[in-house]
Amino acid sequence: MSSPTPKFGLFREPTICIIGDGPHSREVAELITLVLGRNSRSVSPDQQAQLLQGSMFVLGIGKPDRRVSALNTLGKRGTFVTLIHPSARISPSATIGIGTVLSSGATISSDASLGDGVLMNWNSTVGHDAVLGCGTVINPSAAVSGGVVTGIGCLIGAGAVVLEGLTLGDYSIVGAGAVVTKNVPEFTVVLGIPAAPSEELSKRHLDNLRNS
């Protein structure tokens, strides 16, 4: 008797389950088709409890804290797939964690290290020897300079620049277009040129994390 056909999540192989059903999941679906030539299906938060052991996942979530949560919750139930657009440029000495998504034009320089579940959007760059923590999200055209270290779940806004050798604490946020010239504490939102903390937005951000 032949063995049963294996299943991945809610759907039969070769479907890949995209964790999340928001706008970013549609971009990820197109990347799956382009890179892997596979079918995919978005999985809402309500459906995630139904995923079977041995599922294949891709993170389709744009919020860093939810990327980290999904990695922790689902990592033992299946495999997170890494997606790299053909136009992404990666140094041979760079290292990339599981579940990473690199969009078109993403560039990673020598000896940089990306943790699990990192998302680099279009034309974003990471300099030499940078270390990005789990679930970090770099939005389009943002530039992370050499030697920068980010904590878990950081968000770097579109067009922002983080200058060389700085540290961004866990779950910190750099606003779009900001230029970061100093270290950023954990849970802090910074805005502007040069980037400065926003007390109001930082408090709101921390409240959102506590309630998520």
Image (cartoon, helix red, strand yellow):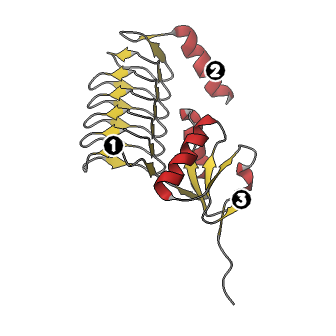
Mark in the foreground, 1 or 2: 1
Amino acid, disc 1 = Ser
Kindly tell me whether residue 69 is visible in this rendering: no
Front residue of 28/81: it is 28
Packing grade of label 1 (10 A; few <14, some 14-19, many >=20) is many
Image quadrant containing the N terminus: bottom right
Say which label, 1 or 2, has the lower sequence index: 1
Position of residue 65 measured from the top left corner of the image (x, y, whole percent): 56, 34
The mark found on residue 113 in the picture is: 1
Amino acid, disc 2 = Asp
Amino acid, disc 3 = Leu
Report the residue at 55% width, 44% height from top: 28
Give the SS element for disc 1.
Answer: strand
Say which label, 2 or 3, has the lower sequence index: 3
Residue of label 3: 10
Front residue of 1/211: it is 1
Front residue of 157/183: it is 157
Packing grade of label 2 (10 A; few <14, some 14-19, many >=20) is few
Report the residue at 49% width, 52% height from top: 34
Q: Report if the CB atoms under discs 1 and 3 are less than 8 Å apart.
A: no
Say which label, 1 or 3, has the lower sequence index: 3
Position of residue 51 measured from the top left corner of the image (x, y, whole percent): 69, 56
Q: Estimate the spatial distance between the alpha carbons at disc 2 and disc 3, rounded to whole Å.
A: 34 Å
Residue of label 2: 207
